[in-house]
Amino acid sequence: QVQLVESGGGQVQPGGSLTLTCAASGFHLPYYRVGWFRQAPGKEREAVGCIDGDGRSYRGVPLYSDSAESRFTISKDYTDNTLHLEMNALKPEDTAVYYCATDLVLNAGPGCYMNPQKYDRWGQGTQVTVAS
């Protein structure tokens, strides 16, 4: 069964750090493009970043939104089929439910999507709260 499960959320003070994990079952996550998104109360779901799937001679490269650039890092863990979102220098405006998603297209080639409508498999989300 194909499934994505996010974990690692919690409450942290401004300036703090959290690392979220997206765990996959039923498919090899590093070979598929994955997006990280977030949704705050009353706001639309927005992209945090994405990473394309690995190819035969290609390793996926992350792409970040303007708000995440230089603070967040997306990485793949090949040993346990997970993806991580390391978040540093967190701000109160980073408070949201964070989701990972994939379109389950294998060998899709380079590139990933920052548009949530391009993804059709989603995790349940994990809450991140940044407050003092």
Image: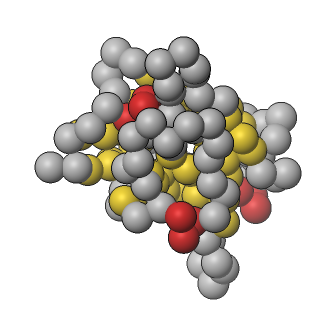
In the picture, measured across the screen, residue 121 lies left or right of residue 25, that is right
Percent coordinates x, y for residue 4 in the rendering? 32, 49
In the picture, measured across the screen, residue 123 lies left or right of residue 88, that is left
Q: What's the residue at 33%, 48% (across, down)?
A: 5
Residue 47 lies, with reference to residue 17, above or below; the image says below
The answer to whether residue 127 shows anywhere in this view is no
Residue 104 lies, with reference to residue 62, above or below; the image says below
Percent coordinates x, y for residue 21 in the rendering? 44, 37
Q: What's the residue at 37%, 59% (across, down)?
A: 121
Q: What's the residue at 50%, 25% (across, down)?
A: 55
- The picture quadrant where one finds residue 22 is top left
Q: How many marks?
A: 0
The residue sitting at the left extreme is: 1
In the picture, measured across the screen, residue 112 lies left or right of residue 125, that is right
- The picture quadrant where one finds residue 90 is top right
Residue 88 lies, with reference to residue 64, above or below; the image says above
Q: What's the residue at 22%, 49% (across, down)?
A: 2
In the picture, measured across the screen, residue 28 lies left or right of residue 94, that is left
The answer to whether residue 55 shows anywhere in this view is yes
- The picture quadrant where one finds residue 43 is bottom right
Residue closest to the eye, 62 or 7: 62
Percent coordinates x, y for residue 17 in the rendering? 66, 35
Query: Looking at the image, what colour scheme do you see?
Result: secondary structure
Percent coordinates x, y for residue 11 in the rendering? 56, 50
